[in-house]
């Protein structure tokens, strides 16, 4: 008897959905499937549950007569379903259709990076960055914390890193190398603040991966502890942008000990499985003339300075593995040979990533050609009134068009674990400048990260962003670039 009642109720519910419609609400990223009906009702209440048949981040959102149900493979899946529900509610003004939306992400790693070193941004801004990521269903925040121009991670063991290394006495003016504005700039995050950011992100199902650069981009650390450089200094926190020759002296045991000590503190603050150890843009010229570095090369039987960098990466990797962590490094870590357990972040285009994947390493694709969101968004950036930037050109369409699997065999494809956009802040002194560069390009990243192989069309994507996300940007008071939404659009 009970069974019959349930069946009858289910049939009634099905008939309540009305007729299926062809044109559906706009959702970004485009879900795996949407079934929408011509029945509308005022939204009223949401129920959630975990369904272990679903993948952890997968969700099914159902609305019937205004009542929403979200099933997720885990709480994370439910959270992504909530973002979709918010998009529907916002565009429907509270009167929502009967609808079933199913989605699951193509990539387990969906990242956004923020450089808080070239310019320092307070915790409130970092939290807003995390809010933006959450709205776009991204799950990995790569936090760039150390640089030539400022060290931002509070170390209790090495306090001069923030007393000295977090401050510079000026910043170069525009693109005029050799000038500086004479204005002291800096700041750092206390360990408590960083833990607060980790917790804030975790509530939004976002993992924070910290980056501690080595051996290059280390001048701020050397300004604080000059004995860790090859020449002994003196060094000062750098005021202009570029690549600088004074890197960590890897010949000295004290430097390795310093890096391990810092990573001990980093691991206390950040519970992430992965720690990013940088590795990019390290000129190895000082090592050539350094007796300590040359002695290390000899003692370890290394062929050259590139292998000395690999020796550092391998030493640090073993150290972190011993603490139950794994490393990620920029694609330069491939140069002197790298262990297969390191994850490679491909930034100089996608070739480094393809080479790493062919070697069997896991890869995060973050090619500057498509995912350097500090690059200009239009071809004629001056005529279009874009703020001064580092250069380059990544339009919304370019960001949308990236194919993470281009030219890859199926056997190698499995090593592409995800994609990420990077936000370098040399030319971004104001927080609104980060918003402007991130939005709406981060929506394109999201679209590829969730559904790289099921994209609809760029024109369709732009319309969905306009309908589903731009009102949210406006509600939040976020600055965004509108070139793609103009009539005609500007590329
Ligand atoms: C980088 O842009 N130097 C990783
Ligand atoms: Zn040295």
Image (cartoon, rainbow, N blue to C red):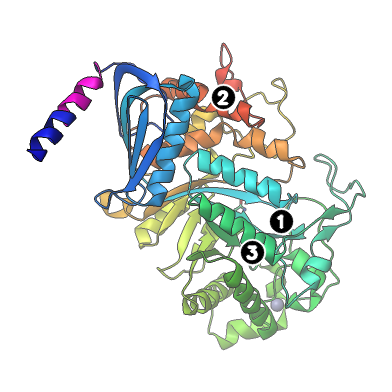
Q: Position of residue 325 (x, y in %)?
A: 48, 71
Q: Residue at x 24, y 50 (%)?
A: 53
In the picture of the structure, the residue carrying the numbered disc 2 is 471
Whether residue 401 is visible here, answered yes or no, is no
In the picture of the structure, the residue carrying the numbered disc 1 is 243
Image quarter in which the N terminus is found: top left
Q: Position of residue 238 (x, y in %)?
A: 81, 58
Q: Nearer the viewer, residue 395 or 145?
A: 145
Q: CA distance from mark 2 to mark 1?
A: 40 Å
| Residue count near mark 2 (Cα–Cα under 10 Å), binned few <14, some 14–19, many ≥20 | some
Q: Nearer the viewer, residue 423 or 393?
A: 423
Q: Earlier in the sequence, mark 2 or mark 1?
A: 1
| Extreme residue in the right direction | 182
> Please, what is the dominant secondary structure of the magenta stretch?
helix
Q: Which residues lie in the magenta part?
A: 10-18
Q: Earlier in the sequence, mark 2 or mark 3?
A: 3
| Residue count near mark 1 (Cα–Cα under 10 Å), binned few <14, some 14–19, many ≥20 | few
Q: Please state if 186 lies on the left or on the right of 434 as rendered.
A: right
């Amino acid at each position: 008897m009970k069974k019959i009642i349930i069946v009858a109720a289910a049939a009634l519910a099905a008939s309540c959905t009305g007729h299926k419609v062809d044109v559906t609400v706009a959702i970004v990223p485009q879900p795996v499937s949407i079934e929408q009906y011509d029945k509308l009702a005022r939204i009223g209440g949401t129920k959630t549950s975990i369904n272990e048949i679903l993948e952890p981040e997968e969700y099914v959102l159902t609305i019937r007569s205004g009542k929403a149900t979200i099933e997720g493979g885990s709480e994370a899946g439910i959270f992504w379903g909530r973002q979709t529900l918010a998009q529907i509610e916002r565009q429907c003004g509270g009167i929502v259709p009967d609808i079933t939306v199913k989605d699951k992400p193509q990539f387990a790693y969906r990242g956004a990076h923020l450089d808080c070193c070239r310019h320092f941004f307070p915790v409130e801004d970092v939290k807003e960055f995390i809010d933006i990521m959450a709205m776009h269903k991204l799950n990995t925040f790569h936090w760039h914390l150390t640089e030539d121009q400022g060290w931002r991670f509070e170390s209790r063991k090495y306090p001069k890193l923030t007393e000295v290394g977090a401050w510079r006495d000026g910043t170069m003016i525009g693109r005029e190398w050799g000038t500086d504005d004479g204005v002291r700039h800096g700041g750092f995050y206390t360990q408590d603040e960083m833990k607060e950011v980790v917790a804030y992100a975790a509530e939004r199902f976002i993992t924070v991966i910290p980056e501690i650069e080595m051996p290059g981009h280390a001048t701020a650390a050397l300004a604080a502890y000059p004995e860790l450089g090859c020449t002994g200094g003196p060094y000062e926190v750098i005021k202009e942008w570029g690549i600088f020759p004074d890197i960590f002296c890897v010949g000295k045991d004290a430097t390795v000990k310093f890096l391990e000590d810092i990573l001990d503190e980093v691991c206390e603050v950040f519970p992430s499985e992965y720690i990013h150890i940088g590795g990019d843009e390290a000129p190895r010229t000082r090592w050539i003339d350094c007796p300590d570095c040359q002695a290390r090369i000899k003692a370890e039987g290394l062929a050259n300075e590139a292998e000395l960098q690999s020796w550092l990466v391998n030493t640090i990797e073993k150290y972190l593995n011993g603490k139950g962590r794994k490393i990620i490094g920029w694609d330069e870590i491939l140069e002197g040979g790298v262990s297969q357990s390191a994850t490679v972040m491909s930034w100089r285009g996608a070739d480094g990533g393809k080479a790493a994947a062919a070697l069997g390493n896991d890869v995060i694709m973050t090619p500057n050609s498509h995912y350097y969101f500090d690059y200009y968004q239009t071809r004629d950036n001056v005529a279009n009134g874009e703020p001064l930037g580092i250069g380059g050109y990544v339009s919304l369409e370019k960001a949308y068009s990236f194919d993470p699997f281009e030219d890859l065999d199926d056997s190698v494809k499995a090593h592409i674990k995800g994609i990420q956009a990077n936000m370098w802040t040399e030319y971004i002194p104001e927080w609104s400048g980060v918003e402007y560069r991130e939005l709406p390009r981060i929506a394109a990243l999201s679209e590829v990260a969730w559904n790289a192989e099921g994209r609809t069309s760029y024109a369709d994507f732009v319309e969905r962003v306009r309908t589903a996300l731009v009102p949210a940007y406006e509600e939040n008071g976020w600055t965004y670039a509108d070139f793609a939404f103009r009539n005609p659009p500007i590329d």
